[in-house]
Image (cartoon, grey):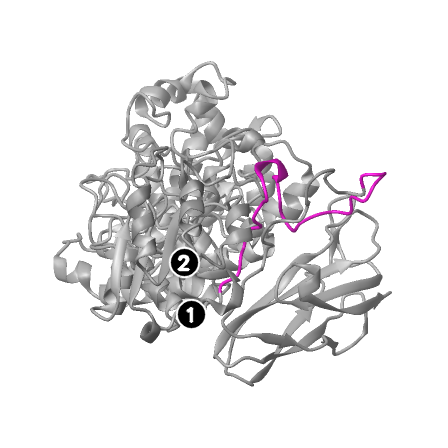
Amino acid sequence: MKKSIIFLMAVILFIGCQQKPTKQLSKKDAEIAVKVEKLLSQMTLEEKIAELTQDAPANDRLGIPIMKYGEALHGLWLVLDYYGNTTVYPQAVACASTWEPELIEKMASQTALEARALGVTHCYSPNLDVYAGDARYGRVEESYGEDPYLVSRMGVAFIQGLQGTGDEQFDENHVIATAKHFVGYPENRRGINGGFSDMSERRLREVYLPSFEAAVKEAKVGSVMPGHQDFNGVPCHMNTWLLKDILRDELGFDGFIVSDNNDVGRLETMHFIPETRTKAAIAGLKAGVDMDLVIGKSVKLSTYHSNILKDTVEQDPSLLKYIDIATSRILSAKYKLGLFDAEPLEIDEETVNAGREEHREFALEIAEKSIIMLKNDNNLLPLDLSKIKSLAVIGPNAHEKRPQKGTYKLLGGYSGLPPYYVSVLDGFKKKVGDKVKINYAKGCDINSFSKEGFPEAISAAKKSDAVVLVVGSSHKTCGEGGDRADLDLYGVQKELVEAIHKTGKPVIVVLINGRPLSINYIAENIPSLLETWYGGMRAGDAVANVIFGDVNPGGKLTMSFPRSVGQVPVTYLERPDFIGSGKGKYRFSDKSPLFAFGYGLSYTTFEYGTPRLVKTAVKVGDATKVSVDITNTGTRAGDEVVQMYVRDDYASVGRYLKMLKGFERISLQPGETKTVEFELNSENLAVLTQDMKKVVEPGTFTISVGASSRTEDLKTVTLTVVE
């Protein structure tokens, strides 16, 4: 009886520390709570503070293990150690372009295995920021797209793959994921990384919160990272309303919060709110930031450090409870990961390399499925290998050699260093062997204004039967800190495209890039265009397989392409704006995007039937289903991404014209028909009322199903909801 009382008291104390009085602990979590409380009682103040930083060194006195961190956005990256043997998958924007969450879950599970093999158990991924339609912002490439539902589905898949589910969650084959950046990070002014974000609560809840809500409630994410910026005047790292009221109390998050790099300290040095580093540390702790991430562990930049906190807490013991809460959450994570019971890791090449070839083959599959064909006039693609004797491969992104240090510029941000990288040039050489002569010329550098290489490129084009021209961006012109004031091809790339086009040769433009670009000349003049984003370590193999028809492209855009920088933000998420004489249009230019959200072509064709409702009328709270038949009317097998959009026709508040609420990627043989079905329920029919409540209001709803967000690609049916 005495032991039971002690156990119960420990659980109650731990729940109090967690600030989650209504949370019902599982048996496993209750046992961990007892262990944490006991360990906490044995720790000195200095030992507690030592736990509040990334990679806190092992505490030999108490047997507290290290929890090593890494990045896992599209494969494992050890931030300060370019270990040259990790699988690098396509960048996040490319992964989302598959519209196949199962692929992302499998990729993340493979990444977790590679992380565990190198002793990493806490990863700062995924990025759940919904792209706000402003491609000047360099971190666009890290996002799953401009739609909250799509980002939610991809995010949940990634977290479940990385962390595991059920009994496998956080086991020896999985690690803790970190959902970032909480919240509204892309809503910055001027497209500048870390710029302040001012927005209504409606926009916060309709666009930016859903992906984090899904991460917490569905995927049970173990860690969350706030954004660099302030939110409506209050920095995220000291924003109690966001971190406690919303994240913990409303969404039910019970993991630990890790700061973005240096951001607790930046409350003083960037936001200029607390006057001292000590006050910054206290502000972060009180708001609920548990771990102070300072890459490189600079004492000068640290806030959760004994030099900063120890004397202050000793002089004001009321602050100790915040130290205890943060320490408890971190210790709890270490127990959940099984780190206290694990044997010291001995890294050997055999363990590290186990299964890697399978991972690299899977990286190729994702790359192939992520490629989007945006244009294919006169069916120039696929090229017939038997009819091509020579092929020009031209452009600054056609090839990249292994770097002496760092990682490849054509892999995108947050990339590890793979054992090799297959460029487009490499991929074509492997594909054609000695059957086709490859004429390669760089043409220009990605970030140069020199045309010195143009003559060689023009010569290569003229002596070839066709041209593959590879342009776009790289980590030199895109990525974190790679914000831009315009969205045209940088340097002289556009001039290179024009020069090659003037040769009269058939030209296929391949985009390798991290953001939507204003490529009007290409869209108007070049017959075939592929968007490949950063395709990972097997990018070149994937491009060659698509161009020669071994793979039929089936990816779809997750981000709208602007016609010019003056059009941003451009996104399919629009509200009615046909007001006055302007009628919601620009005076001298087309308002529509160059390429729309959800758009993508195939080597075959698909025909959609008329959507059908199981029930054309339902009561509030009831559900029904909509189905549609899709037929492959072409001569090749292919994939189609079927998309469902919903609009409440007349509601008590303003709404977007349509919002994605369902999607499914299907494969069809020539002549084959498949039926795709989506559920319509209280979740995807609801609107956010004036008092910020999700409610299904009686009335009619337009349900649109089709191949993209464009009106001409959708077929509709009307659902009636009654009291």
The residue positioned 55% from the left and 44% from the top of the image is 248
The residue positioned 33% from the left and 26% from the top of the image is 305
The image quadrant of residue 169 is: bottom left
Cα separation, mark 1 vs mark 2, equals: 16 Å
Q: How many neighbours does mark 1 have within 10 angstroms: few (below 14), some (14-19), or many (20 or more)?
A: some
The amino acid type, in three-letter code, at marker 1 is Pro
**The one of 413 and 477 positioned closer to us in this rendering:** 477
Q: Nearer the observer, disc 1 or disc 2?
A: 2
Residue 214 visible to an observer of this rendering? yes
For residue 427, above or below residue 303: below
Q: Secondary structure at mark 2?
A: loop
Residue 585 in the image: state x and y as whole percent.
Answer: 75, 42
Residue 408 in the image: state x and y as whole percent.
Answer: 28, 46
Residue 382 numbered mark, or none:
1
Residue 4 visible to an observer of this rendering? no
The image quadrant of residue 239 is: top right
For residue 74, above or below residue 671: above
**The one of 393 and 512 positioned closer to us in this rendering:** 393
Residue 563 in the image: state x and y as whole percent.
Answer: 59, 44
Residue 555 in the image: state x and y as whole percent.
Answer: 49, 63
Q: Which residue is mark 2?
A: 505
Q: Secondary structure at mark 1?
A: loop
The image quadrant of residue 715 is: bottom right
Is 237 situated left or right of 395 in this image? right
Q: Which residues are magenta?
A: 555-582
The residue sitting at the bottom extreme is: 671
The residue positioned 59% from the left and 47% from the top of the image is 209
Is 249 situated left or right of 115 in this image? right
> Looking at the image, is mark 1 or mark 2 earlier in the sequence?
1
For residue 596, above or below residue 225: below
